[in-house]
Image: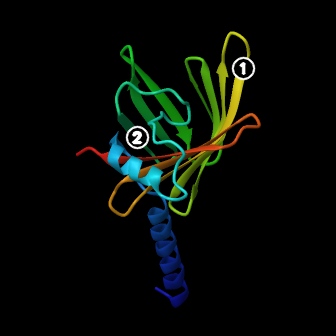
Amino acid sequence: MTSRSLSRFAFVLLSATALAQSTPQFSGVWTIDRANTAARSQRPGGASSNTPVAPANGNRAQSNDWTITQTATSLTIAHPLAGNTTQTFVYKLDGSPSVNVNGNATLETKSHWDAGRLVTEGTRTVRTLGANLKSSFKETRRLDPDGTMIVETTTQTGSGVPSTTIQAFSKKK
């Protein structure tokens, strides 16, 4: 192998290693860690609320478990709601638009990786009898060194003040 070929091989190997390190694996069953969530919410600069919410949709789940399946191209989040129904969100990971319709809510999002964090930004439109209510949000998902999944969601409704929620999740074994 020539030194030039060896240099290219080393570059490709280092690039692949860096890419693998920057995209954490979220697959598994996760449950909300209420104590860790509350502690993070009470820190200076922490969340304004520690109420568990479903991914950027505002509906409370019947169960605290989220099942996440991650592939190279998508992240799917599913969790049970009241009445034996499951709410599912599928996010494309390449920055292209994703549209998720669950009941009367439609999420239009784009997701991308940013320094080991999955950032999902978009709008949520809720159809009501009187009007469509629209809000924008930004959700950042990351893994802490101890394996805790942290989800920080900032929501902006109309001209109101943005609201941020930080949640901590433990992976079930």
Comparing marks 2 and 1, which lies closer to the viewer?
Answer: 1
The colour mode here is: rainbow
Secondary structure of the residue carrying numbered label 2: strand
Q: Position of residue 32 (x, y in %)?
A: 36, 41
Up the image or down, 135 lies above or below 164; here it is: above
Is 170 in front, or is 49? 49
User: Residue at the location (43% across, 53% down)?
Assistant: 40
Question: From this viewpoint, which residue is outermost toward the left?
Answer: 173
Marks 2/1: CA distance?
31 Å
Residue tagged by mark 1? 132
Where on the picture, by quarter, is residue 66? top left
**Residue closest to the eye, 18 or 9:** 18
Work out whether residue 26 can be spotted. no
Q: Residue furthest top?
A: 129
Q: In the figure, 56 relative to 146: above or below?
A: above
Q: Secondary structure at mark 1?
A: strand
